[in-house]
Amino acid sequence: MLAPKKVKHRKWHKGRSRGRLVETRGTKLSYGNYGLKAETAAWVNSRQIEAARRAITNSLNRAGKVWIRIFPDKPITKRPPEITMGGGKGAVDHYVFPVKPGRILFEIDGVTIDQAKRALVLAGHKLPVKGKFVSR
């Protein structure tokens, strides 16, 4: 699954949305002719990205080309169960990518529009965000 090889800071602050409720970067198709665009905000973890990628490649029977436009680089920490408060921040448990509305998540090229739509709808079911099929 996707995880950064090396990070500048092992643990991050959780972060807050600072008024910018829509994405400003990664909102247009760059590589393929068809894409899956997020319509809601959520943290997408590496397991969900991998499940969506597998759904796309299996649906297309390994035809065409798939681009993953997101990479989980935000570390999420977790404390062990039944541990009292105090004792510092927990160890890194997994990595996520914070998705905002408007972000292109996946792109596809080299297949028909019907195949691409079916594959991206299947992938959307694996993700915690509502997605919309977009084309050039």
Image: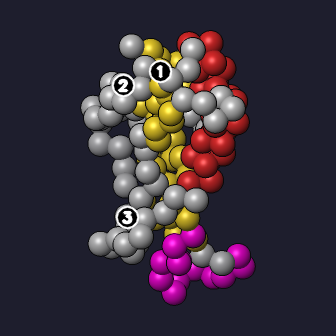
Label 2 neighbour load within 10 Å: few <14, some 14-19, many 20+: many
Q: Quadrant of the C terminus?
A: top left
Q: Which residues are magenta?
A: 81-93
| Relative horizontal placement of residue 14, taking residue 47 as reference (left or right) | left
Q: Give SS at disc 1.
A: strand
Location of residue 103 in the rendering, given as x and y in whole percent from the top left corner: 40, 32
Q: Earlier in the sequence, mark 1 or mark 3?
A: 3
Figure check: 2 above or below 17: below
Q: Quadrant of residue 59?
A: top right
Q: CA distance from mark 2 to mark 1?
A: 7 Å
Mark 2 and mark 1 in contact? Answer it, CB < 8 Å.
yes
Secondary structure category for the residue under label 2: loop
* Mark 3 residue crowding within 10 angstroms, few (<14) / some (14–19) / many (20+): few
> How far is disc 3 from disc 2 in space, using C-alphas?
31 Å
**Type of amino acid under label 2:** Leu
Q: Which residue is mark 3?
A: 13
Using the image, determine if residue 84 lies above or below residue 105: below
First in sequence, mark 3 or 2: give its number: 3
Residue type at tag 3 = His
Determine contact: label 1, label 3, CB under 8 Å. Answer: no
Type of amino acid under label 1: Tyr
The answer to whether residue 7 is above or below residue 14 is below
Tell which circle, 2 or 1, labels the residue nearer the N-terminal end: 2
User: Is residue 6 left or right of 62 when viewed as pictured?
Assistant: left
Q: Residue at x 60, y 75 (%)?
A: 79
Which numbered disc covers residue 103? none
Which quarter shows the N terminus?
Answer: bottom right
Instruction: Decide if residue 37 is in sight here.
Output: no
Q: Residue at x 70, y 36 (%)?
A: 58
| Tag 2 residue | 29
Name the disc covering residue 34, or none: 1
- Place of residue 89 in the rendered image (x, y in percent of width and height, measured from the top left): 48, 78
